[in-house]
Amino acid sequence: MIVPEPRPDRFFPPDKVWRLSELMTLWRAARDAGTTLSPHDQAQLQTLVDEELQATVLRAEERKKV
């Protein structure tokens, strides 16, 4: 699944967009170096990915109502 770059909105606020972007940058660097994120960062990344996916669903449901 490809999810576009998140943009802040009422479903996924700017602070979460910023943190998700930061964690994705760290994840890519770790991947390229053959390492992994810390358990804390990995858990936070997974949580934010899940939240953004839910926000995507909410946006789609809102568009259906129009």
Image (spheres, grey):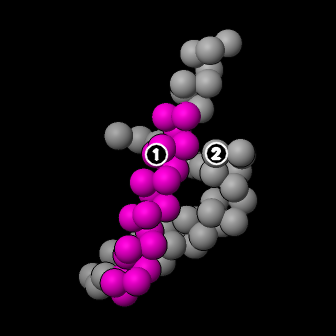
Q: What secondary structure characterizes most of the magenta part?
A: helix
Three-letter code, disc 2: Phe
Residue pictured at 37% horizontal, 87% vertical: 38
The residue indicated by pointer 1 is 53
Indicate the quadrant containing the N terminus: top left, top right, bottom left or bottom right: top left
Task: Tell me if residue 7 is in the magenta stretch.
Answer: no
Residue at the top extreme of this rendering: 66
**Residue 56 screen position, x and y as percent:** 52, 38
Give the structural element (helix, strand or loop) at label 2: loop
Query: Does residue 23 appear left or right of residue 62 in this picture?
Result: left
Front residue of 29/13: it is 13
Residue at the left extreme of this rendering: 34
Figure check: 39 above or below 13: below
Label 2 vs 1, first from the N-terminus: 2
Neighbours of disc 2 within 10 Å: few (<14), some (14-19), many (20+) = some
The residue indicated by pointer 2 is 11
- Residue range in magenta is 37-58
Figure check: 55 above or below 41: above
Give the structural element (helix, strand or loop) at label 1: helix
Three-letter code, disc 1: Leu
Residue pictured at 45% horizontal, 57% vertical: 49
